[in-house]
Amino acid sequence: MKNFIRFENVSYSYDDNEEEYGDGKSQTKTVGHVDYAVKKADFSIEKGEFVAIVGRNGSGKSTLARTMNALLLPTEGTVLVNGIDTQNDELIWEIRSRVGMVFQNPDNQIVGTSVEEDVAFGLENIGVPREKMLEKIDFALETVKLQKERRTEPHLLSGGQKQRCAIAGIIAMQPECIVLDEATAMLDPIGRREVINLIKKLNKENNITIVHITHHMDEVSQADRVILIDNGIVLADTTPRKLFSDVNLVKNAGLEVPQITALMYNLRQKGIDVPQDIITEEEGILVLIELLKKGGAC
Amino acid sequence: MPLKIENLSHTYMKGTPFEKKALDNINLEICDGEFVGIIGHTGCGKSTLVQHFNGLLKPEEGNIYIDGLLMNHSNIKEMRKKVGLVFQYPEYQLFESTVYKDIAFGIKNEKLSPEEEYNRVSDALNKTGLTEDILDKSIYDLSGGQKRRVAIAGIIVMNPQILVLDEPAAGLDPAGREEILGFAKKLRDENGITVILVSHSMEDIAKLADKVIVMNNGKIEMIGKPKEVFRNGKRLNEIGLSVPQMSSVFNKIGEILPDLNINTDVFTVEEATEEILRLLNKGETV
């Protein structure tokens, strides 16, 4: 489906926010100087895409993400999820069952006393009958490969397992999209790999739309599309390959390119003819081997 | 101020079905002014170990010596001043109304004159790369990276001789990460403070540490210079870790081109660039 999540001229300001909550729809136009965390975002995310969002701390990434399932409502502009305006109070649960969120700290988002109870939490809230619930839990745990741990107490899980448990709770609700807000930031290398492999699988096999916010550039290389935000403004909306080819743009936004891309950049600066759009280790190794063979180094 | 750990063991939830040996007979010596990296997968015992360094956890078995003195009941307060421990996400522990008050909290009991106190606070702040103009600000007006540095300044103000940083760069953007790690290195280089860095980033550890301690299941799996440790890529993978990205690239090239005399002790992008250039130059002269 086209325009699964549609941002129409979306701005968000943390100033005066309480006032707006009070009277629901009637939004007062803000006058004078207002700091916007997100400024006039205007783009769409399509069904089945794997989109990475990058930007320095405080650039507005998380704010933008939180508007995707009505955790935050835009100060100006409109966010449409599957055609539904997120301002629509009556359909807010409809929106949240379509778009699930995973946050940074796994310990802040687990509520159950065992893995299966935690996965059941969302289903209980919407009153799913027991039979159906068991089915959905089985499916979710199988998808994230936590069947063996189903009766384990969540605090005994590793970081990667905890995040997978959180993702299972979302999968059980059969969402169309999962938004991960720096969900890999606290994980060790193996935990990160587990989560990345899982979201790639969900994207490819279950056609779930993925929005992944991260500071790890090697994870960005895995996405179909990357959105770079700085100071609340969308600076680039392109493929990881194109974004990382522009080393200066990335550096000026307070970020870095993957190390393998940086190596290619350095070699090019030294006048060596290597492509600049290398973003994965595998591609880089092939290029270097060619180069070393041709250069007569072996 | 050397730190010596002797036969240290620790068990969580002893005597229950959930009993878990978090530390198993650890022996370790850290010298003055060393920059030590500690790596290990989640739950390997890293945090349990560093919490013993300043007596937050007391040894169940084994001894801890700081400066040759055995840590015990009567001197634990003194010891704590010598070893500053910065937890993960220290900014969550900021609680005072202003930056100044928060940093000064740890030296309140030292009965300093206002000038002395101000000097200590601003000195600690400067060491973290921040300037005095933020001292009167509210904690809430700071960025994530600034908050974290203020929290670290609150430890440095107590003049620790050993500074333990548990994942200081987690959740920071690449520029913020460079800043935090850069100032940790500066503290060591310019002030001679021993720095112990716990991290999941093999790249950072390889770049900064003089000595790397690899933990696995409560034991020390390896200990040595980054070069020595990161040569064991296979074993590191088995225990849930990895080698720095550049080492992994160079190891694979070495496997595919075994005749190429490639130096695989390469950890940073700069080192990698130099090694490729060296190999190419060698080729031209042959």
Image (cartoon, coloured by chain):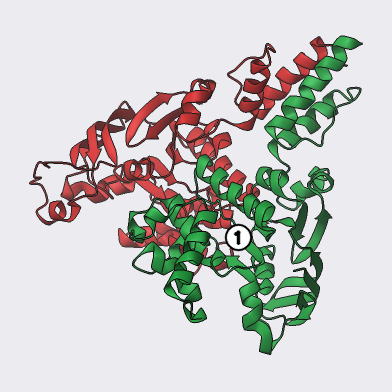
Identify the residue under disc 1.
B166
Q: On screen, A29 above or below A106?
A: above
Residue A98 can be seen, yes or no: yes
The C terminus of chain B sits in image quarter: top right
The residue shown at (35%, 30%) is A234
- Pick the residue in front: B272 or B74: B74
Quadrant of the rendered image containing residue B275: top right
**How far across and how far down the image is residue A210, in percent?**
44, 37
Q: On screen, A241 above or below A25?
A: above
In the picture provided, is A208 more to the left or to the right than B7? Answer: left
**How far across and how far down the image is residue B255, in percent?**
84, 29
Q: Identity of the amino acid at label 1?
A: Asp
Q: What color does chain A have in the rendering?
A: red
Q: Secondary structure at mark 1?
A: strand
The crowding category of the residue bearing disc 1, from other C-alpha atoms within 10 Å (few below 14, some 14 to 19, many at least 20), is many
The N terminus of chain B sits in image quarter: bottom right
Q: What color does chain B have in the rendering?
A: green
